[in-house]
Structure formats: C-alpha cells, structure tokens
Amino acid sequence: MKYRHLFFDLDHTLWDFDTNARESLFELYHHFELESKAISPFSFFLETYLNHNAILWSRYEKGYITNEELKWRRMWRTLLDFKIADEKLAKEMSAYFLEILPTKKKVFDYTFEILEYLTQKKYSIHLLTNGFEKIQWSKLNNADLSKYFEHVITSEISNSVKPKKEIFDYALHKTGGKIEESIMIGDNLDADILGAKNAGMDSIFVNHINAECNAEPTYIIRHLKELESIF
C-alpha cells in the first residue's frame, strides 16, 4: 500500500455539519424565543449566523482570535445585525448551541461503509480537525464514529491549527506516520488541501458540494464511496 496513515477531517467531510447545525440552531431559536425579539424569520437568523461563523472561523484559523472568542462572538455579531447588543444573551446562546450540536448524528452517505472498508483493509485511520477537543469527541461518540479512529488530533490539543504545518507535524509525530505514507482527506481547500501541501503531504479533496477547486489536491472525489478506487 502506498498509504498507511489516513487523516480525515470531521466537519463537512464525514459529519454533516450543515444539517446538524441547522437543526441545533432551530432548537436554539425557539428555546430563546428569538422571534419575540424581532429576530425573524428563522431562515434570516440562520443565514446571518452562518455568515458570521464562516468569517470568524477563518480568523480563528489564521490565529487572529482565540477559540473562546470564536465560540461566543459569532452569536454576538449575529445579534448585533438584529440591533441587539446583549453580550450575556450571546454567551448563553453559545453555551446552549455547543451543548446540543454535538448530540446530532447526521453523517454523509457511505460514512460508516467507507470507514468499515478502510478498517478491514488495515489502514491506520486518524482524525485531524480544527474543532474543539470536548465537542469533537462528543460528536464522534454520539454519531458512533469514535471506534474507527486510532488517534484524534484537534487544534486545541495540538496547540496549532490547519493549515499550519505544525499541526501536521504534530499529527505525524503522534501517530508515528511518515509523510510519504500519509494522506489528508477533507473538504476545506485552505485548511485541509493547502495545509497538507504545505506540510508535504498528499491530499484528497472531498467535494460534496461541487465547489470550484483552485488548489491542487492529489485526488478529488465527490462521494465517499470513491475512496474505494484510491485505497
């Protein structure tokens, strides 16, 4: 086998973040009675939150803000767009969201099948994620995914973040993998694909949404089943 160590991203790659986040935010919306605060409709609240979440995640990955700032400021900035300057409410919403989000179980089609396939073929499967330690473990356990991964490396535990080379170096050291027998599998062109390239590692771009690809991954797939043609 050319590859022995497979490093998967979690959110948007295996775990269906968009579906799970939408469901969690819908529960949050009603729990805090946001419609009564003139935050409506839900679709506008969702769109506003997702926009701020994407912006702040990018800032977090570039090292401009801490993970704690990311957690509550995305709610804070969302509320500000609705003319509500309530830091206490933003932090309460953040805590509630992070409590219920990891309990959701939606994964992409063929997630379990491909992980079983790779396990049976004796690959060493690891998780390399920019998510938070406690939350990512909760997602894995609730979705019954944790049993497939030998090592789970988060940005929090590694004290680095994709696409920085340091987190890939940490992952290789932690797993005992060699760069030439390792490959990164993820959906994010910056964090996963360019990050792997900067570390000298091969990569697979999991393009679930048929996005334009301006990077140069080693492989591109549009469905997890296609991994069987590579491994």
Image (cartoon, helix red, strand yellow):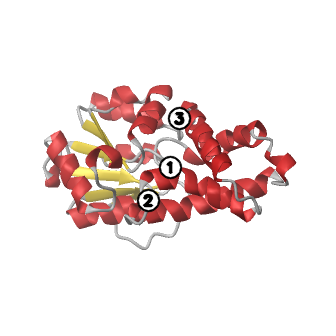
Is label 1 in a helix, a strand or a loop?
A: loop
Question: Do the residues under discs 2 and 3 have CB atoms within 8 angstroms?
Answer: no
Residue marked by disc 3: 102
Please, what is the three-letter code of the amino acid marked with disc 2? Asn
Q: Label 2: few (<14), some or many (≥20) within 10 Å?
A: some
Give the CA distance from mark 2 to mark 1: 8 Å
Q: Earlier in the sequence, mark 3 or mark 1?
A: 1
Quadrant of the drawing holding the C terminus: top left
Give the CA distance from mark 2 to mark 3: 20 Å
Q: Earlier in the sequence, mark 2 or mark 3?
A: 3
Is label 2 in a helix, a strand or a loop?
A: loop
> Mark 3 or mark 1: which is in front?
3
Asked whether residue 66 is in view, the answer is: yes
Q: Is residue 211 above or below residue 115?
A: below
Determine the residue positioned at 41% across, 64% down.
189
x and y percentages locating residue 99 in the rendered image: 56, 34
Asked whether residue 19 is in view, the answer is: no
125 left or right of 13?
left
Q: Quadrant of residue 10?
A: top left
* Towards the viewer: 72 or 143: 72
Residue marked by disc 2: 188
Question: Do the residues under discs 2 and 1 have CB atoms within 8 angstroms?
Answer: yes
